[in-house]
Amino acid sequence: MLLETEHLIIRPFRHDDEAEAIELFIDPGFMVWSLDPPHSRGSARAKLQSFIDLHQVHGFSKLAVVVRSVRHLVGYCGFDLEPVGGPPAPELGFRLHPDARGKGFATEAARAVVADAFARLNMPFVQAIVAENNAASRRVLEKLNMIYQRNVMLHEFEWMLYRRDAPA
């Protein structure tokens, strides 16, 4: 499974991503909007393995986002299972290194991932949660035509829930 956009290659994480992925997951700037603090090297390896395992089991996961022109891993975009208002279900998430922000990469990656969710995975809808004060991520979701539904509690925090139904 490989998604290619104008500027990005979006693909499942691999074990040979370990060095670059660890550097991202331990970076405070990368983890700024996460519930988790920056990872240790050990927990970063475990996070990478969890993405690989989820993709093998479900056919979706957080996917590596690589800038085509330099073949450099700058973040991830994709789905994880989260109990958003019910049993665990796919929830869209994306995160980029601070140097890769503000270039349209989050929107470009998320558009490709959502299109794949509808076309290949036949998801009936996509949902995402975002912190109210994370204006940049809210703008990305709105550019994807996701609509704010309500606030939800998850992991003891309140989040804004966005949703988009599959095209008819």
Image: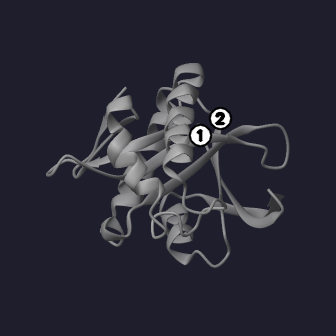
Identify which amino acid the numbered label 2 is placed on.
Pro
Q: Residues within 10 Å of mark 2 (few under 14, many from 20)?
A: few
Foreground: 162 or 69? Answer: 69
* Residue underneath mark 2: 124
Q: Secondary structure at mark 1?
A: loop
Would residue 124 be found to the left or right of residue 94 on screen? Answer: right
Q: Residues within 10 Å of mark 1 (few under 14, many from 20)?
A: some
Identify which amino acid the numbered label 1 is placed on.
Ala
Q: Outermost residue toward the left?
A: 69
Look at the image and tell me in which quarter the N terminus lies: top left
Instruction: State the colouring used for the structure image.
Output: one colour
Foreground: 64 or 150? Answer: 64
Foreground: 28 or 5? Answer: 28
Foreground: 106 or 54? Answer: 54
The image position of residue 126, as x and y in percent, is: 62, 44
Mark identifier at residue 166: 1
Q: Which residue is at 44% across, 40% downward?
A: 63
Q: Which residue is at 32% across, 32% downward?
A: 16
Q: Which residue is at 52% across, 21% downward?
A: 56
Q: Secondary structure at mark 2?
A: loop
Would residue 68 be found to the left or right of residue 141 on screen? Answer: left
Q: Which residue is at 19% across, 47% downward?
A: 68
The image position of residue 48, as x and y in percent, is: 49, 39
The image position of residue 148, as x and y in percent, is: 69, 64
User: Are circles 1 and 2 on residues that touch, CB within 8 Å?
Assistant: yes
Would residue 98 be found to the left or right of residue 88 on screen? Answer: left
Mark identifier at residue 22: none
Look at the image and tell me in which quarter the C terminus lies: top right
The image position of residue 107, as x and y in percent, is: 41, 59
Chain-order first, disc 1 or disc 2:
2
User: Mark 1 and mark 2: span between their CA atoms?
Assistant: 5 Å
